[in-house]
Amino acid sequence: MFIKMLKKRLGRNEDGIAMIMVIGVGSVLTLLAVAAVAYTTGSISKAGNDEEWNGALAAAYAGVEEYQSLLANDPGYVRYGNPASTHTQYVDPATPTLVSSVVAPPTTNPAFGLGTAGTWAKVPGSAKVAGGAANAFYRYEVNNAKYYSEGTVTLRSTGKVGDSVRTIYADLKQSGFVDYVYFTDIETTDPYSDTSVCARHVWDVPPRDSGCQEITFLATDVIHGDVHSNDRISITCGATFEGPITTGYKPPAGGLTYKKSGTCTAPNFAGGIPPVSVTPVPIPPTNAQMKKETRTDLPDVVPNPGCLYTGPTSIVMTNDGYMQIISPYTKKTQVSGEPATSGTTPAACGTPGTAVGSLGSLLGAKVKVPTNNLIFVQNVPSVVGDPNYTATTDTMTNGVATTNAAYLSCRGSDAKNVLGYPKTGETAPAAINSTPSYGCRNGDVFIKGKLNGAVTVSAENYVYVTDDIEYNNDDKDVLGLVGQNAIYVWAPVKKSATNSTYTCLTGYCDTDRTIEAALLSVAHNFTVQNVAIDVPYRGTLTLKGSIAQKYRGIVYNNSGYVKDYNYDKRFKYMAPPKFLTPASTTYGVSTWVEIKPVFKASGAYR
């Protein structure tokens, strides 16, 4: 139409010129048409490429999620991977002693494929659709070098759709007790009996007795970090929570997720959000599984065994990376079998015996802090065949010659244990649920000092924090303390000879206490020793780390310490070495970043 109008306007005598113009205009229109077709075709191609490009990233995410589910179903799956992977073989220059140790799984996992002939796992539900979108696949490579020290595993997951390939790098961390500055299973004072009517959550069937003493967050409490309780939390108006709160309590419709004490509208919740109901996080019934980390007969599960000590054990950390250990009952510091049938005495754990510089000597043994490892303190075994067995009738001189002599069965005139507890003049706390304080053959650990290193110390019985525990380097050092029974802030008292009053023991009336560690009492609580006795106020208890406990522990009750609890934010990304995890464990992605694709679409490394 445009060409006809042009001819008519120019007339017959200008046919030649018209023809030239027609040809020129036609050429322009042809070019425009070609460009339009090219643009349309390019748009279709770009749309297809965008779909594949985005799909490849989604496939990489699917790989991470699938690996997370495998770990959730079987935490031991962290051992598996493809040993030939370049990521598996990667060693962090900052921690060259931590080496990945994956092995091929017993059942083939296509996501562990490598090379052009290697397999890829298909994203479930993906399929070719109209427009050319291809199936989605993924591969992932595992590096578990830091799993045994920090509870983290790194994953390189690569997704592929058509010719598009994308890779993400993710740190997966076990969800655990160190995710919270304050974690409690049951919000009552410790009944010291699992059969007590108070040893129940408020939501149990039947619930705990109404007369059970619930511990309340006070108006003066300021909690710097996340809080979780499997129970209903009791909170006084004025209490301040600077992080989110979760609870295992699910109230009736319209009810509060916490128990409010006071007439205010609400306590000071972070963002104004009250506790959120979630699935309870179960505490294991015992820390006995941690002893496994000192066995030499499980190389696939325990590639680097820690140190085992027996009976009352004193540990003093020094800022030079060493620790002074006194442990007179110890005979073998690593064992084989469960129950143990044999043992060894590696120099790294100290030499047993009473010779100067040995574990049973007056000053004990000076050894390096086990690197990214575990120390377990066990009760004296009662099985004769155990390599650490000591008969109750046996005696041992603790020290050089006859100085500081002590009997292993506490038959001395002062009934002290081998470490000299109770101290001279001290009134020892009464036994709790038939478990005595300072038991002569108990796996108690007495610990203090300045840590230079990364280690977890676990006791089969009590943990006594006898003085400040601090880090030499707040960025690098990390400590875990786990007690099957209570973790005590040691606070010795002396009962008057003339009346029933108590005073703090002379020489141990220090004010203020600092603890930098992740704390976990499996069966009882974290508390101040003798807190129920009306003795003078002791100052401020400063914590940097996390607290997890079966029951709520008391640190101030007309005596004791005012709380200053602060979360160690590093625990969002790591945990102390071989720290105990919940009975049911999940893995969350603590960090992730997209990196340059490590594979070509053919499957070969780039």
Image (cartoon, rainbow, N blue to C red):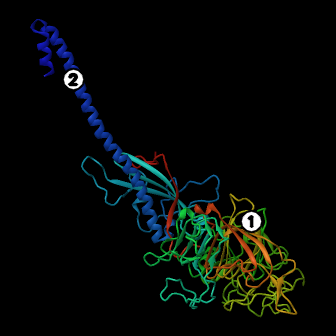
Residue 50: image location, x then y, percent: 35, 44
Above/below status of 560 relative to 430? above
Residue 123: image location, x then y, percent: 35, 58
What amino acid is labelled 2 in the image? Answer: Leu
| Number of marks | 2
Above/below status of 204 relative to 222? below
Label 2 sits on residue: 29
Residue 427: image location, x then y, percent: 81, 87
Secondary structure at badge 1 equals strand
- On-image quarter of the N terminus: top left
Is there any visible trace of residue 601 in the rendered image? no
Q: Characterize the local packing of mark 1: few (<14), some (14-19) or many (20 or more) Cα atoms within 10 angstroms.
A: many
Considering every residue shown, the one lying at the far top of the view is 13
Q: Characterize the local packing of mark 2: few (<14), some (14-19) or many (20 or more) Cα atoms within 10 angstroms.
A: few
- 44 horizontally vs 396: left or right: left
Q: Which mark is residue 470?
A: 1
Residue 166: image location, x then y, percent: 43, 48
What amino acid is labelled 1 in the image? Answer: Glu
